[in-house]
Amino acid sequence: MTAEIAVMNRVAIALAADSAATAVFAGNVPKIYNTADKLFALDEREPIGAMIYGGASFMRVPWETLIKLFRSTNSGSRETVADYGQAFLDFLITEPLLTDDFIDDYFRSTVNWMADQFMEVARAESSEKSLDLADSIRGLLRSLYQNWMARPFLGNMNDGTINELRARYYGFLEKFVEFQFLDLPSIGSTERDQLKELALLFMVKDLKHTSSGIVVAGFGTNELFPTLISYDIEGMVYPRHLRCRSVHNTTGTSIETGANIIPFAQAEMVHSFMTGIDPDLENKISRIFRELLERLTKHMASRLPPTLSPDEISSFSNEILQIAKLLNDEFAQELETHSREKYVDPILDAVELLPKDQLAVMAETLVALTSFKKRMSRDSETVGGAIDVAVISKGDGFVWIKRKHYFESALNPRYMERVRSRYQKRS
């Protein structure tokens, strides 16, 4: 996990990211490293940056490698931040180094992961409801098939993509289903075909929980104010369809909106700072209030005179339930209004006036708060390490405020000369 944040006003946008990365080894034993790079300049010269969170790689290729490869081969002015984001997505699709071998390996590993999750749920349901495993599998197959059929396709994929995958991976899918149901002879051809179809539907309509978040932020040539766009990206399916979903669509500042604060990944401390209440506590309060209203309704209904008819009792109960629902909605609205007036709006008003250096301080502090909270709790320290901070403005471009290095610049004069030479060639 990680903590990242974008703090922006009409002058600039500050990006901050921690350095913690979690690897899970055999036996689900997590190991946390505090050396990961998650914040990058996306272009050699233009005012545009990128952050990554979630999965650290794209089909086993580190995001750092892909971002720097894009930067070295695709730098250039673009009109909007959305254009930079689309250019990066197009790069992933067209990059020749990402061969069909990567795509095939990704398909096989993802389908096997999906099947493991499916069988785990089926076994748990079978144990919990005292069902035969085969019956649990049949019910789950029907439910998931209906659910995924109703979902929209990812990106530009469609039914034709499913046909392409079915043709390319026919042999693999046959062996895959045979292996999954090896010890279940009562599972027939109908269920086997359904599992194959589920695998294909999952590839074109859903993302794993380990997908990567990609944030692109800065200025396009036609943009006066900073803009941000982000995606959930996982991999690519044959022939070259990206499994991707847009999350924040060009969220930024404008003439009307003078400031914005957008957290990514672990955002609970930012939420607490912005709204004045921890999100878990807020949910707990709302749940308790709703349950108390429901208990009050039942109590009042139980005290009604026995002379009332069932229809009168039902009518009274429904009326009380409606009143309780209105009270619950009013409570939530009052809480939200108080939070906005007393916490959110004053903070955003202050951010609107911050100079560039203070935007950087605020972004770093919010990430540091999340790291400190993790350190002081019983949770794993999934946020930590050095905090990288950059500020992007229209005039100054991408400027590092804090940046960790794994090497000393003084010991690497040739590297520094290569960087200067590459920059001069692009000038």
Image (cartoon, rainbow, N blue to C red):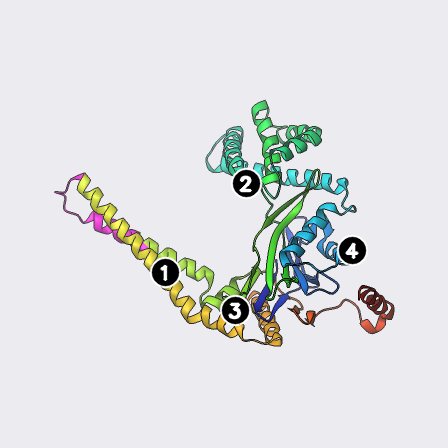
Q: Earlier in the sequence, mark 1 or mark 2?
A: 2
- Please give the residue where the numbered disc 1 appears in the rendered image: 333
Q: Secondary structure at mark 1?
A: helix
The stretch in magenta equals: 292-310
Quarter occupied by the C terminus: bottom right
Give the vertical position of 375 relative to 305 (above or below). below
What's the residue type where badge 1 is placed?
Gln
- Please give the residue where the numbered disc 4 appears in the rendered image: 73
Q: 271 or 399: which is nearer to us?
A: 399
Q: Earlier in the sequence, mark 4 or mark 3?
A: 4
Instruction: Answer whether residue 302 is magenta in the image.
Output: yes
Give the Cα separation between the discs numbered 2 and 3. 34 Å
What's the residue type where badge 4 is placed?
Thr
What's the residue type where badge 3 is placed?
Gly
Where residue 160 sits, quadrant-wise, is top right
Disc sitting over residue 258 in the figure: 3
Side (left or right) of 238 relative to 134: right
Where residue 80 sits, quadrant-wise, is bottom right
Q: Earlier in the sequence, mark 1 or mark 3?
A: 3
What's the residue type where badge 2 is placed?
Pro
Does the residue at mark 4 contact the one at mark 2 (Cβ under 8 Å)? no
User: What residue sits 62% from the left and 35% below the top?
Assistant: 200
